[in-house]
Amino acid sequence: MVSNKCQKADFCDEVAGELDISFARIYEDNPPTRQIVTTNKLVLVADLSLLMVGHLLLLPK
């Protein structure tokens, strides 16, 4: 059975609001987050591995 919940995945932890994530360790809270927009269903984040300038990721919560 496949679980639809993320566990122990840095990206999922970041979307969930965890503070001890690789993004925070690398960028030392400057910027404080890579989340651009958050709704109750979606999160828009800046991608750390850009395919091209302005590349963003739209993720379901």
Image: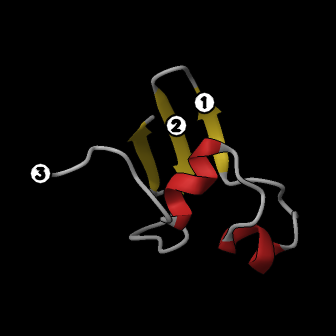
Relative height, residue 26 to residue 55 (above, below): below
User: Mark 1 is on which residue type?
Assistant: Thr
Q: Identify residue for label 3.
A: 1
Q: Residues within 10 Å of mark 3 (few under 14, many from 20)?
A: few
Q: Is residue 26 left or right of residue 11?
A: right
Mark 1 in CB contact with mark 3 (< 8 angstroms)? no
Q: Residues within 10 Å of mark 2 (few under 14, many from 20)?
A: some
Residue at mark 1 to residue at mark 2: CA–CA distance: 4 Å
Q: Identify residue for label 2.
A: 43
**Between residues 40 and 46, which one lies in front from this camera angle?**
40
| Horizontal and vertical percent position of residue 43 | 52, 37
Give me the disc on residue 6.
none
**Callout 2 secondary element:** strand
| Horizontal and vertical percent position of residue 4 | 27, 44
| Colour basis | secondary structure
User: Mark 3 is on which residue type?
Assistant: Met
Q: Identify residue for label 1.
A: 38
User: Mark 2 is on which residue type?
Assistant: Val
The quarter of the rendered structure image containing the C terminus is: top left
Q: For the point 78% across and 57% down, which residue is it?
A: 19
**Between residues 12 and 49, which one lies in front from this camera angle?**
12
Q: For the point 87% across and 72% down, which residue is it?
A: 28
Q: Is residue 52 left or right of residue 34?
A: left
